[in-house]
Image (tube, coloured by chain):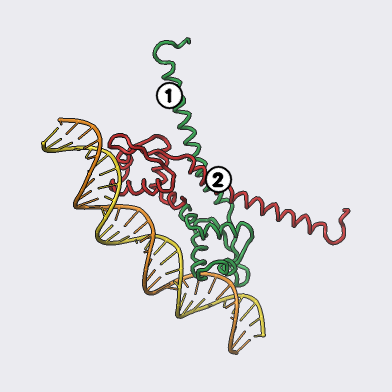
Chain colours: A green, B red, C yellow, D orange
Amino acid sequence: MFHALAISTRRDILRRTIEREQSVSTLASDYEMSFAAVQKHVAVLEEAGLIVKRAEGRERLVRANPEMIARARALLARYEELWRARIARLDDLLAESASDTSNEGM
Amino acid sequence: MFHALAISTRRDILRRTIEREQSVSTLASDYEMSFAAVQKHVAVLEEAGLIVKRAEGRERLVRANPEMIARARALLARYEELWRARIARLDDLLAESASDTSNEGM
DNA sequence: ATAACGTACAACCAAATGGTTGTACAAACA
DNA sequence: TGTTTGTACAACCATTTGGTTGTACGTTAT
């Protein structure tokens, strides 16, 4: 999933398909690279679950999947939570050592 | 940055160094791969700014950098924000078309 | 002083990756 | 019907990448 987000072209495709549903060729026309290259990027995003495709005639309409974006964000939010927990633990240790030797009733 | 987060070993290193500051060899002893491999993963995380190293004698102590984790999360949060904006826009369009032809005073 | 430890880095290798072109096929259009 | 359009996919290529081993060097311990 993070792998899918690691290339700027793919993040750009994600951003565009958040704004509006688009066909693969519409997307492709906005980049310097070949259609096949864009199609592969779309496939990577699709496998990661970050976008969803829908058939409409001969076109394949691509739209972002907000659920997966939220999941990636939640994972990072959990790292931040771990960090806060660490800080809290250090605070506890500090509080302990501040009341260890003698002057507990200061 | 997302590239740095794309490999599970690196996410694991990040998690461990959130919990406590550790030397590179301490980290390395927890994985099947060679010391050099772990050292390279640490280097990638360092270049992405996700961790910070500090010299202490012959050891290099590694700790997570919460600022960068927050930045990655914020980027994804912005994508979600874009999505909400899209939904809001669609709602506006819907409201418009609901009051377009005749029965405005319904 | 010598040995052991922790780290950095270069050289190398296999696999994955981002890109290309070419082919095939279904849908839309002339 | 024949042609164009949109898509998928295979084959190929150059580069990157995750891994290895080996070497070098400063720091700690004997």
Q: Chain of mark 1?
A: A
Q: Indicate which disc residue B74 carries.
A: 2
Q: Picture coordinates of residue B18 (x, y %)?
A: 43, 37
Q: Chain of mark 2?
A: B
- Number of residues whose C-alpha sits closer than 10 Å to that of mark 1, classed few (under 14), some (14–19) or many (20 or more): few
Q: Picture coordinates of residue A89 (x, y %)?
A: 45, 28
Q: Indicate which disc residue A74 carries.
A: none
* Callout 2 amino acid: Ala
Q: Is residue D29 above or below residue A10?
A: above
Residue identified by numbered label 1: A93
Q: Nearer the viewer, residue D22 or D6?
A: D22
Q: Is residue C13 left or right of residue B80?
A: left
Q: Residue at x 44, y 44 (%)?
A: B50
Q: Is residue D21 left or right of residue A18?
A: left
Q: Are marks 2 and 1 on the same chain?
A: no
Whole-Å distance between the Cαs marked 2 and 1? 31 Å
Q: Is residue D22 above or below residue D1?
A: above
Q: Picture coordinates of residue B28 (x, y %)?
A: 31, 42
- Find the residue positioned furthest to the right: B105
Looking at the rendered structure, the secondary structure element under dot 2 is helix
Q: Residue at x 57, y 50 (%)?
A: A67
Looking at the rendered structure, the secondary structure element under dot 1 is helix
* Callout 1 amino acid: Leu
Q: Picture coordinates of residue B27 (x, y %)?
A: 33, 40
- Number of residues whose C-alpha sits closer than 10 Å to that of mark 2, classed few (under 14), some (14–19) or many (20 or more): some
Q: Are marks 2 and 1 in contact (CB under 8 Å)?
A: no
Labels in figure, total: 2
